[in-house]
Image: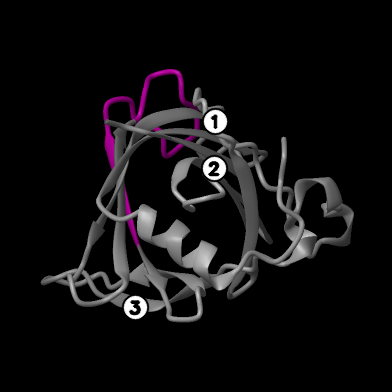
């Protein structure tokens, strides 16, 4: 897995973020938890980025799928559809952040911050040391068959929700010349008084 270890340029991060707009992805999610009430197993679905407003830099990330019978846990109901939304926000500096969506009637709007992306050198999988508790190892994004060279940018973003800590890592497989995202993956490790979850998501572009 070839991963960049230097801080990406603003231009590259802006191009990466821009390439996500108006794209659709197949989603494979593996959930693991020691809590029998939590869902365990693999979910499959689709995800998409759509522009909230042509004049701004907010992408609405939305995902959906159906829970298969092989998934276990008190909340696992075979055939039940699941959905989730976030707002991904870009900035003039190349900064990327993820926001929760307001739970209210009407248009989708950003509510409060989930996390900022940190593309610092320490997010490289080769350098990751989960024993420190500061971050988690980024997952490997799906391999893409292409004649062009690719590289992987890794990032992290943490969020404290009352007593639960959400540590997230991302890995984007991109064309280094253009910043186009070919595939990507994310990982959420949730620790708390009643939570001990490890969730890995893999995304492949849909034509």
Is residue 78 toward the left or the right of residue 34 in the image?
A: left
In this rendering, the answer to whether 196 lies above or below 34 is below
Q: Could you classify mark 2 by the number of other residues whose Cα lies within 10 Å: few (under 14), some (14-19), or many (20 or more)?
A: many
- Kindly indicate the quadrant of the structure image that contains residue 34: top right
In this rendering, the answer to whether 174 lies above or below 26 is below
Q: CA distance from mark 2 to mark 3?
A: 24 Å
Q: Could you classify mark 3 by the number of other residues whose Cα lies within 10 Å: few (under 14), some (14-19), or many (20 or more)?
A: few
Based on the picture, tell me whether residue 142 belongs to the magenta stretch: no
Q: Which is more toward the observer, 47 or 65?
A: 47
- Looking at the image, which residue is at 38% across and 19% down? 69
| Residue annotated with mark 3 | 111
**Quarter of the image where the N terminus is located:** top right
In primary-sequence order, the first of circles 2 and 1 is: 1
Measured from the top left, where is residue 170 in percent x and y? 59, 52
In primary-sequence order, the first of circles 1 and 3 is: 3
| Residue annotated with mark 1 | 142
- Looking at the image, which residue is at 19% across and 72% down? 104
Marks 2/1 in contact by CB < 8 Å: the verdict is yes
State which region is magenta.
Answer: 67-86
Residue 69 in view? yes
How is the structure coloured here?
one colour
Q: CA distance from mark 1 to mark 3?
A: 31 Å
| Residue annotated with mark 2 | 185
**Quarter of the image where the C terminus is located:** top left
Camera-nearest label, 1 or 3: 1
- Looking at the image, which residue is at 63% across and 43% down? 151
Q: Which element type, helix, strand or loop, lies under badge 2? A: strand
Q: Which element type, helix, strand or loop, lies under badge 1? A: loop
Camera-nearest label, 2 or 3: 2
Based on the picture, tell me whether residue 74 belongs to the magenta stretch: yes
């Amino acid at each position: 897995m070839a991963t960049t270890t230097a801080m990406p340029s603003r231009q590259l991060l802006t191009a990466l973020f821009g390439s996500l707009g108006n794209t659709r992805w197949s989603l494979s999610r593996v959930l693991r938890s020691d809590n029998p009430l939590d869902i365990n197993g693999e979910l499959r679905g689709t995800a998409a980025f759509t522009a909230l407003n042509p004049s701004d830099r907010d992408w609405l990330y939305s995902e959906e799928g159906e829970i298969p019978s092989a998934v276990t846990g008190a909340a696992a109901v075979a055939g039940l559809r699941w959905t989730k939304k976030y707002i991904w926000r870009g900035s003039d500096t190349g900064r990327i952040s993820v926001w929760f969506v307001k739970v209210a009637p009407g248009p989708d709007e950003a509510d409060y911050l989930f996390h900022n992306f940190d593309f610092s050198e320490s997010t490289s999988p080769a350098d990751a040391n989960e024993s420190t508790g500061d971050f988690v190892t980024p997952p490997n994004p799906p391999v893409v068959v292409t004649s062009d060279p690719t590289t992987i940018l890794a990032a992290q973003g943490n969020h404290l929700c009352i007593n639960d800590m959400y540590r997230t890592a991302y890995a984007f497989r991109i064309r280094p010349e253009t910043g186009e995202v070919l595939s990507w993956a994310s990982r959420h490790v949730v620790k708390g008084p009643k939570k001990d979850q490890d969730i890995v998501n893999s995304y492949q572009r849909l034509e």
